[in-house]
Image (cartoon, helix red, strand yellow):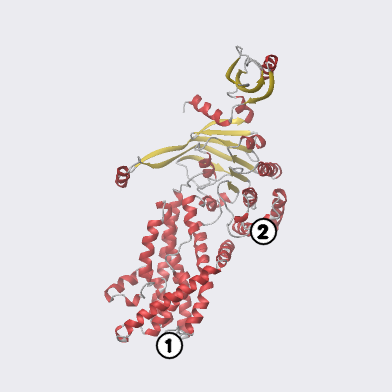
Amino acid sequence: MIELRNINKTFKVAKRNAGFSEAVKALFKKDYTYIHALRDVSFTIGDGEMVGYIGPNGAGKSSTIKIMSGILTPDSGECVINGRTPWKERVSHVREIGVVFGQRSQLWWDVPVIDSFELIRDIYKVEEGQYKKTLSGLIELLDIGEIVKTPARQLSLGQRMRCEIAASLLHSPKILFLDEPTIGLDAVSKIAVREFIKTINRENKTTVILTTHDMQDIEALTERIILIGRGRILLDGSLSALKSRNSSHKTLRVDYVGEGLPASEQMTVIKDLNGHGEMLIDTDRLSVSEAISYISSRVEIKDLSVVGETIDETVVSLYKEFEI
Amino acid sequence: MKQYLSFFRIRFIAGLQYRAAAWAGISTQFAWGGMTLLMFWAFYQNGENSFPMSFPELSSYIWLQQALLAMFMAWFFDQEIFESITSGGIAYELCRPCDLYGMWFVKNMAVRLSRVLLRCVPILLVAAFLPEPFGIKLPPDGLSALLFLVSTVLGFLVLVSFSMLIYISAFYTISPMGIRILATSVTEFFTGALIPIPFFPEALQPVIYALPFASMQNTPFLIYTGHIGGAEALGSMAVQLLWLFALVLTGRLLMRRALKKVVVQGG
């Protein structure tokens, strides 16, 4: 059980203008600005849930993960995870969590991965029988039997990421934080990682909290999403709720042969050039299929795609809505 | 305890991989030790009595210094630790259920010991067969040898606990370079790495012996050569112990304070 109540975090950032004289001035007097990384962040996540924590860069995702893993102390607010406050009881707290930071590595660079695993086993004091069992399970699921004998420096990014995930699960944590686990991976590795995350969530009832910029990750994995922007929780609900929000308009991208795209009251032509065009449909008044049949009755459609709003666009429109 | 041991092992094994570096180090240290001795030899030609140590004592001191250089060098820092602080890799280390101070301490010890293990034996062997009075001699008696061993361990721990302070300073300064350079030159000078401490001016000696730096390599080397012995040796070792406690305590306090306000940068 994870519970956050009114978490606030402010960072002090030194600022100066460009130029030599400004640099000299800064030697004596520094100007600081305060960045509110998190403002009154509250949410609750139950055991065994899988939650996507999303938002644009600088929204406060990583700060929240760091607070929940006990690395960062917030300015105010409460955070209770399995009955403990992470930053106050760091050591006993981290024993029950696993963390993967997609942009950093926890494997020792110049030794075979298996050596890193054994070190992690000793650090977490995992009992030998238990370790063997967990390890063989992980090796099979992640298909890393061959690569664990290779030094980490010689692994490809996809191989390394699979080993990183295995490393953070060796002590069978109850909660797994994944901070951009699919960053930089190719399609095959992404699918393998997603499948694996699904499996451990289903079979071991591990609570998974996942931050990502990849909408496919979210669509493949999570039912519930928490959307954060400029340090505030903007939305906490199901993925479909997010999608249906601000989706009263859809864009149709059409390649066609014919005279030109037909406009009507419910659909406007945004762009129409040499047989490539885009139309904006008001879906409250006209369904997508109606729009398509209307267009195809006038021109011959060669290719057509429906462009929904991307998550980032949704966030931007939510920014406007909340006036932040 | 077991986690520290495995931690030690993995760093130690990694350190043993660098054999070419060890050979390069050995030859440099030979040249350096030889040059130092020849320079002192030139001074000693003016009459040995005006110097605080006899020449054979000095030879043993210098060769020990070269052989154990990797263990006692104050200018050596584990780049990985600085990187983990400045680049944020420390995030992972903080997600482990262990004490960060202890982990880094052990890591430091392992890196230094793996280096010294590769280097000290060839240097000591060759130095033992150098002609009188340039070679290294055995300690005057068994007791000195025993005290030397204990004092070496203490001196090593004092040095590591001092360099821990430099690592921890990286939490406060973002770029650890400045403090590193300052600390390195100060320690090099006052540990006796440049000139053995007995050669410092009389008036300065009490000040130097009051600093933690004299408790690093100087104490065990002086015990080995027989320059100090008996009660005096035990007294110096008590000072070593005192500094070890003081430095570890300061380091732990500073670390605890730093971790409270730590900001993991980037991502």
Label 1 element class:
loop
Residue pointed to by mark 1: B132
Residue A142 x/y as whole percent = 69, 49
Which residue does the image show at 48% across and 72% down from the upper left?
B153
Residue B84 x/y as whole percent = 50, 53
Q: Which mark is residue A149?
A: 2
Q: Is residue A132 left or right of residue B157?
A: right
Which residue does the image show at 50% across and 40% down from the upper left?
A78
- The foreground one among B102 and B14 is B14
- The foreground one among B233 and A260 is A260
Q: Which mark is residue A293?
A: none
- Can residue B209 be seen here? The reply is yes
Where B131 sits versus A229, above or below? below
- Quadrant (top left/top right/bottom left/bottom right) for the N terminus of chain B: bottom right
Q: Are marks 1 and 2 on the same chain?
A: no
Label 2 element class:
helix
Where B241 sits versus A183, above or below? below
Residue farthest to the front, as pictured: A274
For disc 2, the chain is: A
- Can residue B52 be seen here? The reply is no
For disc 1, the chain is: B
Residue A312 x/y as whole percent = 55, 31
| Mark 1 residue crowding within 10 angstroms, few (<14) / some (14–19) / many (20+) | few
